[in-house]
Amino acid sequence: MLSQAIGDLLPSAVGVALSPVPIIAVILMLSTPRARGNGPAFALGWIAGLVIVSVIVLIVAAGSKNPGSTSSDVVNWIKVVLGVLFLAMAARQWTSRPKKGQEPAMPKWMQAIDGFTPAKSLVLGGALSGANPKNLALTLAAAASIAQAGLSGGQSTIAVAVFVVIGSLTVAGPVLFFLIAAQAAARPLEAIKEFMSDHNAVIMMVVLLILGAKLVGNGITGLAS
């Protein structure tokens, strides 16, 4: 059922949306002289990355809609493996979090955002959504849930669209806010950037812990049925 598939993918979509690094990156872009070109290009690349990975996984896992099929078992094992991976990543996020009074480390490429062109921004958006290990794993989990739901082509398209829209809210949303009201957007976007930067590790730890437990449970249930 479409409603069940959407319910299953919602946690992964929210996990993608709450990824601190792309949120910080897009807000930094919106404070540069090329904001009106780089911001939309980054958001477009982000959306394209989510769509491409989702469609590829759906095509590969097309046979998993039959619960008793080998493909279905493979997808269930993928869920278990991804769940364990998420739990390991959650533990790593917790142990590597900045100590009290210590500045959180951000990727070095963020220092060069001022010199980005729209083309570089487009590529970066696609890389952070489609090639970043955390978001790639979250997208794989969402697409696997859609593949197992036994949906028609149209329903699968709707499910992917819901995943992409939710997963893009925190990236495309700030861009739209900036384009509509740049001056009004400056202060709240700066506050969001600082919050995400200060709590990067904790946010991702909680998201990965919840998703990891959910995926392991779903995968084991599917293998046992």
Image (cartoon, rainbow, N blue to C red):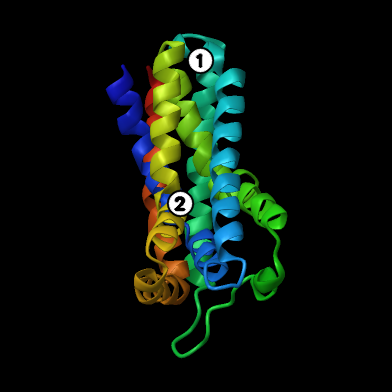
Q: Which badge, 1 or 2, comes first in the chain's sequence? A: 1
Task: Determine the image quadrant of residue 49.
Answer: top right
Query: Is 110 above or below relative to 36?
Result: below
Residue 141 percent across, percent down from the top left: 49, 35
Tell which of 201 and 19 is nearer to you.
Answer: 19
Q: Amino acid at mark 1?
A: Ser
Residue 124 percent across, percent down from the top left: 66, 54
Query: Is 1 above or below relative to 212?
Result: above
Tell which of 98 and 104 is nearer to you.
Answer: 104
Which residue appears at 37% of the width and 69% of the height? 185
Dot 2 falls on a residue whose secondary structure is helix
Residue 97 percent across, percent down from the top left: 50, 74
Mark 1 and mark 2 residues within 8 Å of each other at the beta carbon: no
Whether residue 218 can be seen here: yes
Query: Is 67 above or below relative to 164?
Result: above
Which residue appears at 54% of the width and 11% of the height? 63
Dot 1 falls on a residue whose secondary structure is helix
Query: Is 169 above or below relative to 195?
Result: above
Whether residue 108 can be seen here: no
Q: Amino acid at mark 2?
A: Ala
Query: Which circle marks residue 167 in the picture?
Result: none
Looking at the image, is mark 1 or mark 2 nearer the viewer? 2
Label 2 neighbourhood size at 10 Å, few (<14), some (14-19), many (20+)? many
Which residue appears at 49% of the width and 29% of the height? 143
Q: Which residue is mark 2?
A: 172
Residue 36 percent across, percent down from the top left: 55, 61
Query: Which circle marks residue 64 in the picture?
Result: 1
Marks 1 and 2 sit apart, C-alpha to C-alpha, by 32 Å
Tell which of 29 and 90 is nearer to you.
Answer: 29
